[in-house]
Image (spheres, rainbow, N blue to C red):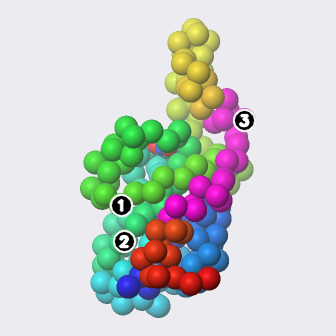
Amino acid sequence: MIKAIIYNSNTGFTKQYAYHFALNTGLPIYNIKEAKKKLNKDDEVIYFSWINANKITKLKKLKNYNIAYIGVVGMSFYSEELIESLKKDNNINNIYYLQGGIRWRYLNTFQRIIMKIVLSGYEKKHKKGLLNPEEEMIYERINLGYENVDLNSLNHLIEWYKDLNNFVS
Ligand SMILES: Cc1cc2nc3c(=O)[nH]c(=O)nc-3n(C[C@H](O)[C@H](O)[C@H](O)COP(=O)(O)O)c2cc1C
């Protein structure tokens, strides 16, 4: 039985999804530090976290828990290839992808540097007209920052949880 939600969020998008999931399921919600105090080894949990360089952040810190599903938040567009590469790079299967955004003002110095490097890669191609329409959109989104949380995109995961528990609302 799933005991709780654990989340890890850097600029707030993942936290928004995790709290929406908590509101709709009644599950207790903790950040990683709180979870250590409140949960026991092998407890079943749902983890929400963001992607950094295709890695689900702080996944290793959850090795003592049994993860039923991971809500993974990133700036990429959804595609089957994306899900497959996330599964492969993170060695985990139960991934539920969600769109976040970019909040430049909340990034730390290191993260800003990384994002600026990514941006300059896109910029060079943009100037040469080498970006496809999807890449153009990502370039604009990174450049200006954007917020793309869609709480309705959690509906299938919420339904999955409710079915699992014969949840009556
Ligand atoms: C340094 C850095 C690396 C990132 N790498 C990826 C990535 O590989 N794939 C992706 O889809 N999003 C990537 N993102 C975008 C974040 O996953 C996105 O901003 C997410 O919404 C952050 O969630 P948060 O607000 O909960 O921190 C990256 C962001 C930063 C700052």
The residue nearer to you, when weighing 8 against 76, is 76
The reply to whether residue 163 is visible in this rendering is yes
Going 56% across and 27% down the picture, which residue do you hit?
134
Q: Which residue is mark 3?
A: 144
Please give the label number shown on residue 68: 2
Compared with 95, 4 (above or below) is: below
Contact (CB < 8 A) between labels 2 and 3?
no
Residue situated in front as seen by the camera: 120 or 145 = 145
Q: Which residues are magenta?
A: 140-157
Question: Tag 2's secondary structure?
Answer: strand
Binning the other alpha carbons within 10 Å of mark 2 as few (below 14), some (14 to 19) or many (20 upward) gives some
Q: Is residue 70 above or below residue 112?
A: below
Q: Residue at x 48, y 61 (%)?
A: 71
Amino acid under label 2?
Ala
The answer to whether the residue labelled 1 contacts the one labelled 2, judged by CB atoms less than 8 Å apart, is yes
Q: Is residue 122 magenta?
A: no
Checking the image for residue 94, the label placed there is: 1
Residue at (57, 8) in percent of width and height: 128
Q: Position of residue 159 (x, y in %)?
A: 52, 68
Measuring from the top left, give residue 76's x and y in whole percent. Answer: 52, 40
Tag 1, which secondary structure?
loop
**What count of labels does the image hold?**
3
For this rendering, which residue is in front, 87 or 38?
Answer: 87
